[in-house]
Amino acid sequence: MPAPNPREVSAPARSRYSLIVIGSGISGLFVALEARKLGPVLVLTKGSIDDCNTRWAQGGIAAAVGPLDSTAQHLADTIAAGDGLVDEEAARVLCEEAPARIRDLVQYGVSFDSLGGEVALGREAAHSHSRILHAGGDRTGAAIETALSAAVRDPQITVLDNTLVTSLAVERGRVTGVEAIALQTGATEYYEADAVVLGTGGAGQLFSHTTNPQVATGDGIALAFDAGAEVADIEFYQFHPTALRLEGAPTFLISEAVRGEGAILRNHAGEAFMARYHPLRELAPRDVVARAIVAEMRRENADGQFLDCTGLKSVDLAARFPGIHAFCSSVGIDMRTQPIPVAPAAHYLMGGVRTDICGRTTLPGLFACGETACTGVHGANRLASNSLMETVVFGKRVVEHIASGEGGAARSAPSLSPISPGEGAPPTHARLQDLMWRSAGIERDASSMQDGLDTINSWDHPGTPTTRPAFERRQMARLSALMLHAALARTESRGGHYRSDYPSRDDARWRRQQVWVRE
């Protein structure tokens, strides 16, 4: 059944473009660069151009470019990590097109690290080969964002920062543009385009402990859902196992690449405990490692465990991980001689706006790519360093599809769950974060999730938001309610969704996506 169109939004357009891109991370900027040949492109971002998740990505970007590697092995690892829910067609596209997209990034000015004249390849959890390209040691995201930000200084590309998109314009069932607030003046603006691309990133700010920056509030997913597009896999949230947990210090990602170089997880007794939980130990899938750390924390009544790098005598940690080394030093930890206190933190949303392999949503004229989208490539648990690659692989496909002139929308899912998650917003950002960490964190159960949902439903309707914080709170509350509905409905544990009251995987009932649409 087609997605309903709950409301029509239209207004006189002040400006018209071939393409509007919402978001200025790797997905948004890459799409803008690829699309400039189609005509004028407008990039809208609610902060500055470099205020995005991409800048904080440390480990790198995955591609089978090593002499002993292959796309078939990359595909097998991606499918295995996804815990039974990976869309194999999408995953094959990702793995087969990855090497070509690396070449595109190099052409746009990204300089990947090399060793002995060959590209340097790191190892991360659940990868069978070293296939992680990195730049600036552990500053891959920053290197990519810097290169793309410089490249979009192009006469065909207009970038408007501090511009908050508040709704998608829908006319006769098709997205035709956006309504936005210019945050510096408070003026409402309207922009029209042949197509709109969502590249707004993830939603880590739903949780009190997250590796994501403040900009990651899930706006694009909520915008698409409000306009009538389908949303899928929203219950699957990946919690990165190793984020710095130190009183008085901000949450900071300690890249999986550190474990790839041989760092060991230890408890407060100094024991290397991962062998009790998985044969791959520190390089087990992220969901396994995160739950193992939580189990040790509970057993010891501790608020974290330790990542021990002191045995890595053959690795120059300051050179290989300059960002992590510098940050740890700034909070009084020398990672070469002291273990790093760590605990899991919200990191990546596997679900999002449902798309096909061309980035089409179920709403004509609307496309999505990157963490905002759900192509199905990650299944229930993303393979490390596939995220940056997903943005460029499917971003390229978005532009190629628009250029083909075929139009249309992705086919609707065979089974939809209509839902209206409410209009209320929390009184504070922190209250929502605390609620979601308790209700929908690493371990969930029906009681905690229902309590969370009841609390969200009790919040007052705040009226039409006119400021960025108020708008973000409303969108975050809506997305939180949707996540809780989906997690309550999935009565099993799989990948990033672990229920203590249903601790087993149930393939007979649940080897399928849940797809939601606004009632």
Image (tube, rainbow, N blue to C red):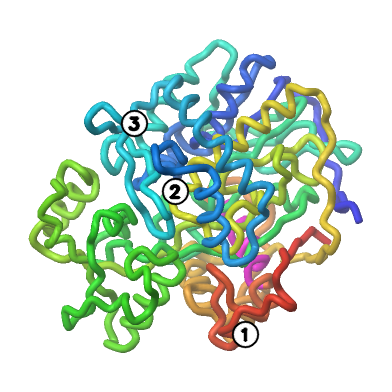
**Which residue is tagged 3?**
112
Q: Amino acid at mark 1?
A: Ala
Numbered label tally: 3
Q: Residue at x 56, y 50 (%)?
A: 75
Lower sequence index among marks 1 and 2:
2
Question: Residues at badges 3 and 1 in contact (C-beta under 8 Å)?
Answer: no
Specify the quadrant of the image occupied by residue 285. Answer: bottom left
- In the figure, residue 448 lies in which quadrant? bottom right
Query: On the image, numbered disc 2 is attached to which residue?
Result: 385
- In the rendered structure, does residue 65 fall within the stretch colored magenta? no
Relative depth, front residue between 440 and 389: 389
x and y, in percent, of residue 47 in the image: 48, 38
Which residue is pictured at 37% across the width and 66% down the height? 241
Q: Give the dominant element type of the magenta stretch: helix, strand or loop.
A: helix
Q: State the mark number for residue 446.
A: 1
> Which quadrant does the C terminus fall into?
bottom right
Give the extent of the magenta segment. 470-484
- Mark 3 is on which residue type? Phe
- Most distant residue in the front direction: 68
Q: Which residue is nearer to you in this view: 225 or 15?
A: 225
